[in-house]
Image (cartoon, rainbow, N blue to C red):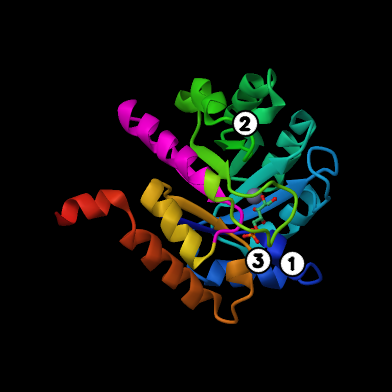
Amino acid sequence: MIIAPSLLAADFTRFGKEAARVDRSGADWLHLDVMDGHFVPNISFGPKVVEQIRPLVRIPFDVHLMCSRPQVLIEPFARAGANQIQIHVELGDPVTALLWKIKSLNRKVGLAVNPPTAIGMIQPYLEQIDTLLIMTVNPGFGGQEFIHESLPKIAQAAAWRRQKNLGFHICVDGGVDFKTAAECARAGADAFVSGTALFRQTNMKAAVARLRKIVQANDPALADLKV
Ligand code: DX5
Ligand code: ZN
């Protein structure tokens, strides 16, 4: 189970301190939301921020590119210290080349799918990815409400993963809190991006531990073992 706090919910005047707080929390990845004001109606931060916080954090950097032209951003983010780079399946034709580009830079590869996009769109890429990022809100802003219609997509992805004997992570992103994380885990998710729910806690370490316990308790693989 992977817990990935999203820096989008941090205090933007204190990126360094907030990133270090995530590092000390026992989380597994730091999730970094990159928005270009075109693919989504918001702008967040660029490679310079990622480069400057990289030495302050030991855990892997998971860079989520919500951008129309990731081809111009993959190399700068790889250089800035990204360990995994995720692009969106909604980009269409360029997806295959973009996945190979990320792989050729020796970074982990992620593919994200928006709530209105059919899960079938990601099927051709399952063998090529390390992480499938199922958006559980429409991307662009933190603090939105979890979209429950995403749960069957998680279950479908988990079924394909089992049938094809693949090992990619099924990661959920958007409106993930202690309650919705449990629902996602039950559906088959094993990685959890959470911004608002974790950053609003004074004790992030306790919150990460609590979230981890909740998702582990709802892991269907472990439930099978108990029977
Ligand atoms: C949404 C971003 C998410 C966001 C999640 O556009 O991709 O990663 O930060 O934030 P919360 O957990 O607040 O919904
Ligand atoms: Zn994200």
Position of residue 137 measured from the top left corner of the image (x, y, whole percent): 64, 49
Residue, x 59% and y 68% (percent of image)?
A: 197
Residue at 61%, 72% in the rendered image: 21
Residue 102, which numbered label? 2
Q: Tag 3, which secondary structure?
A: helix
Disc 3 residue type (three-letter): Ala
The amino acid at mark 1 is: Phe
Q: Residue 17's quadrant in the figure?
A: bottom right
In the rendering, which numbered label is found on residue 15?
1
From the viewer's perspective, tell me whether residue 174 is left or right of residue 160: right
> Where residue 86 sits in the image (x, y, percent)?
62, 39
Q: Residue at x 45, y 24 (%)?
A: 127
* Camera-nearest residue between 25 and 224: 224
Quadrant showing the C terminus: bottom left
Q: Residue at 81%, 71% (x, y): give it.
A: 13
Tag 2, which secondary structure? helix
Q: Can residue 119 be found in the magenta stretch?
A: no
Was residue 161 drawn as part of the magenta stretch in this picture? yes
Q: Are marks 1 and 2 in contact (CB under 8 Å)?
A: no
Asked if the residues shown at circle 1 and circle 3 are in contact, with their CB atoms under 8 angstroms apart, the answer is: yes
Q: Give residue 215's quadrant in the image.
A: bottom left
Q: Which mark is residue 19?
A: 3
Q: Residues within 10 Å of mark 2 (few under 14, many from 20)?
A: many
Figure disc tally: 3
